[in-house]
Amino acid sequence: MYCSANINKALYCLLFVFCFTRLFSQKYTLRQLDTLLIRKNEELRTKISNKDLILWNENLVKISIENNYPKGEAWGYANIANRLWLIGDFKKSLDYLNKAVEKSKNINDDFLEGKINQEFAQVYSAMKLSKLALDYNLKAMKYALKLKKDNQDCRFFLRYVYSTRASYLAEPYQADSSLIYLKKAVRIEANPLDVAHIARYYIWDNKNMDSANYYFKKSFILLEFKKFKHNKYQRAVVLHNYGEFLETQNKNSEAIDTCKASLRLAKEVDRPKLILNNFQLLADLYKKIHELDLENEYLNKATSLKDSLDNNQNKAVILAIDSMEKKELDEKRKTQNNALLYGSISVIVIFLLCTYFYLQIKKKKAKLIQSNEIIIQKEEETIDLKRKLSENHETIIQLARDNSIGFLAKFQEAYPEVCQKLQMVNAKLTKSDLSFCAMIWLGFSSKEIAQCTSMEHRSVQTKKYRIRKKLNIDTETDLYYFIRSISQF
């Protein structure tokens, strides 16, 4: 099996060298360039390294420039940006996407506009700026829906837009909306990753294990199709989701083997988030079978990787803000430079124009600062910092996990402002209500709360609903965000 994999890798390398050599040995029509940039690029994505695919597109950009073909340039830049955000180089990725935007300004092509907006969505999703990701994804979808439905490339692009939107919606816990887009994607083309995500929905939201099992079987069958057989990332995701399914069936040994197989593939394709998810799942599984050393080993790995990812995420947000501010400053300089060309314009008009653009920039910055995702992130970072400063934090977490009667008293001692503010909203909150809110404030998921309190998952959801009513929280406000930020009010 190992030998076969090496042979396939060698064949793909020879294929790339052959294609790359031919790329510069002949002239291409614009239609042929489109095929190379769209269809051939998609084919090579799972067969050659990110570095080689970037090189491939860089040379297609050069050929497009030689042929005075700005559409080809823009498409090549978008393809390069896609590889760059995957390897974590967000700055370069955004730079290339801005180049693509510049080149596409005078081109009326819905497919190209959809592609560029979707890549912006992917970059911002990787940077944990979910609102921006959803906004750009929505723009991409509007362009994708204008495309010809009988064109295979266009149909597959629309499937990709639906699939990624489902993953974005899953992050803010909009599971029902996520399922809608997953099924839309599968109707266009059944894909192992999307089908496995549907199975996962039935595990956590409906507890419908028969449906989950059906979709997992379908996903594993699809993985054996020629189109997906060598896609390690999709196989890794399917295996991870299936490991979660086995855990719910108390098949812990099988779940551990499945999770480790997913972990090996995730490392091969360098997908840190998937690696983290596998670390966390393995820690849970080893805890269930009372293997404390292995539980601690994977908890430490998960903590270390999460800290690293959080650090990169914070840097990425700062990078996004800097990039936007730079763009605004460039616009301001351009405006000022243009103003200097018109010497006949009076000083008063110049002053008014500068003031106008200054206010516009200030307004944009204010909107950016008020962006929900960044606000939530900043507030969560502040809360996390307070938690780390509290010497009793780990003790409180353990008391919650043990469902200890002393949990609430210890929590109130360490974080008195939380319960005080909650009781200011509703003085009739019971100790049970306050304990439940305290676990939410500490970041416990519904699943964790159910495990710690020996409640059914459905009972946890019912409790959340009752807490919402007692605290008079509208349906559009996230319960976790409200309780976590209560001490800031």
Image (spheres, rainbow, N blue to C red):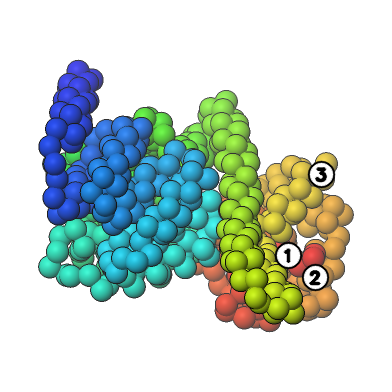
Looking at the image, residue 317 lies above or below residue 455 = above
Q: Residues within 10 Å of mark 2 (few under 14, many from 20)?
A: few
Disc 1, SS: loop
Res 193 seen here: no
Answer whether labels 1 and 2 touch (C-beta < 8 Å): yes
Disc 3, SS: helix
User: Which residue has dot 3 on it?
Assistant: 389
Which quadrant would the C terminus be assigned to in this image?
Answer: bottom right
Kind of residue at badge 3: Leu
Q: Residues within 10 Å of mark 1 (few under 14, many from 20)?
A: some
Residue at x 42%, y 58% (from the top left corner): 102
> At which x and y percent is residue 220?
22, 45
Residue at x 67%, y 47% (from the top left corner): 402
> At which x and y percent is residue 27?
14, 41
Looking at the image, residue 384 lies above or below residue 295 = below
Residue at x 77%, y 44% (from the top left corner): 388
- Snapshot quadrant of residue 464: bottom right
Q: Which mark is residue 489?
A: 2
Res 68 seen here: yes
CA distance separating discs 1 and 2: 7 Å
Q: Residues within 10 Å of mark 3 (few under 14, many from 20)?
A: few
> At which x and y percent is residue 431?
76, 67
> At which x and y percent is residue 303?
61, 36
Viewer-proximal residue among 443 and 330: 330
Disc 2, SS: loop
Q: Name which of mark 3 and mark 1 comes first in the sequence.
A: 3
User: Which residue has dot 1 on it?
Assistant: 485
Q: Name which of mark 3 and mark 2 comes first in the sequence.
A: 3
Kind of residue at badge 1: Ser
